[in-house]
Amino acid sequence: MTLFVDMDEVLADTYQAHIDIYNSEFGETLTREECFGKEVWQCVPQERQQSIRQHARTYGFFRDLGIVDQSQEVLEQLNQKYEVYVASAAMQFPNSLEEKSVWLDDHFPFIPWQRRILCGDKHILKGDILIDDRSYNLKNFSGRSILFTSPHNMNTNGFERANTWLEIADKLL
């Protein structure tokens, strides 16, 4: 069986990176909890929103992301049972291509480059399971769709949901 796993907000904690950079840049104390149901840029004054929107265009942003808890251990186990691919919409931020690949080398070396799909639109994916934090990537997927919880999708309904990687393990192992 083929399992596609998104990178941002599923393996790599881009959401927290946006908050940390914002707090450092503006001397603020924004928290994840304050952002539930929204994108980080929606939680700050309008005159600061563009700064957050530029984070992902900054060299180094994708290189230094934190790892979502338990993702390494569970994905390594899933890799023994499924044909696992990391599928990330990287074309929106072209400098992310190299950084995402290096990040995966460092943190998920058991997923070889041949099983990394850095694409523009995930509608091309055809397989058995897709784990993603964005409902628009899941809605047209023909296989089983699992919405991985992130602060921005707290109010999204209509999909099978997993809040943690331990829940993913319970569902798929």
Image (cartoon, rainbow, N blue to C red):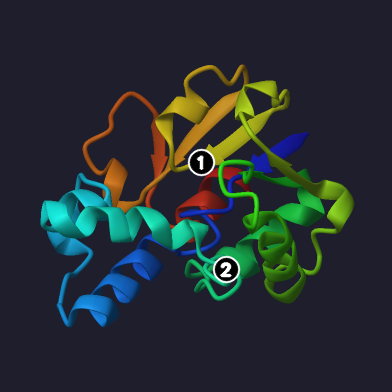
- Looking at the picture, how far across and down is residue 171, in whole percent? 53, 44
Q: Secondary structure at mark 2?
A: loop
Q: Residue at x 29, y 53 (%)?
A: 50
Closer to the camera: disc 1 or disc 2?
2
* Gap in angstroms between the C-alphas marked 1 and 2: 24 Å
Q: Nearer the viewer, residue 101 or 132?
A: 101
Q: Is residue 160 left or right of residue 172?
A: left
- Asked whether, in this view, residue 103 is left or right of residue 146, the answer is right
Amino acid residing under circle 2: Tyr
Residue 33, image quadrant: bottom left
Q: Position of residue 119 (x, y in %)?
A: 69, 37
Q: In the rendered image, which quarter is residue 106 located in? A: bottom right
Q: Pointer 1: residues within 10 angstroms few (<14), some, or many (20+)?
A: many
Q: Are marks 1 and 2 in contact (CB under 8 Å)?
A: no
**Residue found at x 70% / y 26%:** 125
- Residue 120 visible? The answer is yes
- Asked whether the viewer can see residue 82, the reply is no
Looking at this view, is 65 or 140 the one in front? 65
Residue picked out by circle 2:
59
- Above or below 170: residue 142: above
Question: Disc number at residue 120?
Answer: none
Specify the quadrant that holds the N terminus. Answer: top right
Which residue is depicted at the point 51% across and 65% down? 58
| Residue 24 x %, y % | 28, 81
Specify few, some or many for label 2: CA neighbours under 10 Å numbering under 14, 14-19, or 20 or more.
Answer: few
Q: Amino acid at mark 1?
A: Asp
Mark closer to the chain start, 1 or 2: 2
Residue 145 vertical position relative to residue 113 in the rendered view, above or below:
above
- The residue carrying mark 1 is 132
Residue at 39% across / 39% down in the picture?
161
Seen in the picture, residue 95 relative to 25 is either above or below; the reply is above
Q: Residue furthest front?
A: 47
